[in-house]
Image (cartoon, rainbow, N blue to C red):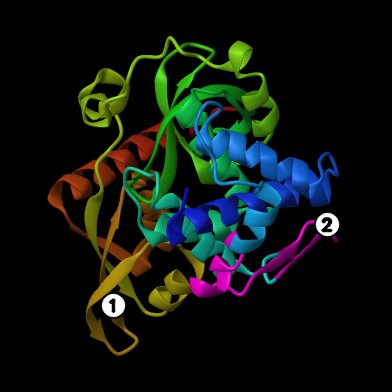
Amino acid sequence: MKLSAEQQLILAIEELAFGRKYVIREKKMTGEELGAAIYEMYFGPDNPRPGSPERNFRNYRKQFPAFGLDVAMDLQMAKISGFENNRDVIKKICRFYLNRFSIFYNDFPLERLIRTALDPGGIPYMLASINYGIRYRLPLDFTYHKMNSKKKDRRRVYPYAMTVRGDYLNVVAMDAADRRIKQFILSRITEFHTDIIDVFTRKEETAAPHLSPFDYDAYLQSEDGSFFRQKIRYTIELLAHSFDHFCHSYDFPYTVIEKKGTTKTVIELASVDFHGVYQMLFNYGQFCRLLGPEEAIQEYRQLLTDALAQVDSHSGKE
């Protein structure tokens, strides 16, 4: 059984991701045991596999330099070099892996995830866990910090798909608490608790085979999926030095469409995060102006009017 170069690189990435957790950090498995576990997940329990994992994984690692990744690993010596704290390598690894199973992908949401993660080196493990969770209908456990909420909650979900929605990498999953299908933003996962090899080993008791086949397009038209806003293109005028501040303070991808020295810069940015855009406009005050689209101008004006009404209604009260 011969694997393609891409299949070999996927297995090498999974050995790196799982080896970092199980062999090096937690010391729960040997490299040989890990290789056997990955083979079981990758090929499935009843399918043929190409010989000895230990020997073959040495060959799979050779795909790292072949694909331009300066990574070396020796799990017997519990060493991985060229990976930890190397965000460029982490991005390349995650990009390659995501492109093999995500419905949609682009670089910006991944860059945001890597930039904001407390442990960027743990992202490949999370992605591989999500991949196998989708494939075998296994549960994932994590702590989640919902947008616009002060509270962090422990969640158990059954993943259906990985995708990009707006400016974020999301996993579409059924929330075990209420059995509704939701989108969870990966950069809002503050702790990933899943032990995917243990969950897979116990799949007879942990898996959810009753889950119906997932249709992403149908989901977007459903009540659960349709409330997510589509990406909106905003035209914004930044005055004085607010553009320089914007470049160093915000993560929105943008295009400059007009510039007059240092006095005025007009940009176009596309985002699904309307809260973030309106917060930025409010922060810049008189040094920023929303030029379009008209629906956004009206919505932002109404938000300001409502906020001012709240201030007026409470003025003079103790």
Please tell me which residue is depicted at 54% across the width and 13% down the height of the picture.
177
Quarter location, residue 263:
bottom left
Q: Which residues are magenta?
A: 60-81
- Give the mark, 2 or 1, whose residue is nearer the N terminus: 2
Numbered disc in front, either 2 or 1:
2
113 inside magenta stretch: no
Where residue 11 is drawn, which disc sits there?
A: none
Point out residue 139 in the picture as x, y percentages from the top left corner: 57, 23
* Residue 76, numbered label: 2
The kind of secondary structure element at disc 2 is loop
Q: Is residue 228 left or right of residue 144?
A: left
Residue 61 is a magenta residue: yes
The percent position of residue 243, horizontal first and vertical second, equals 38, 75
Quarter of the rendering containing residue 29: top right
Percent from the top left, x then y, of residue 173?
Answer: 44, 26
- As displayed, is residue 149 above or below residue 164? above
**Which residue type carries mark 1?**
Thr
Do the residues bearing badges 2 and 1 touch, measured as CB atoms within 8 Å?
no
Residue at image position (34%, 87%) is: 262
Pointer 1 residue: 265
Kind of residue at disc 2: Gln
Structural crowding at the residue carrying mark 2, measured as other residues with C-alpha within 10 Å and reported as few (<14), some (14–19) or many (≥20): few
Determine whether 117 is above or below 73 in the image: above
**Is any part of residue 289 visible from this angle?**
yes
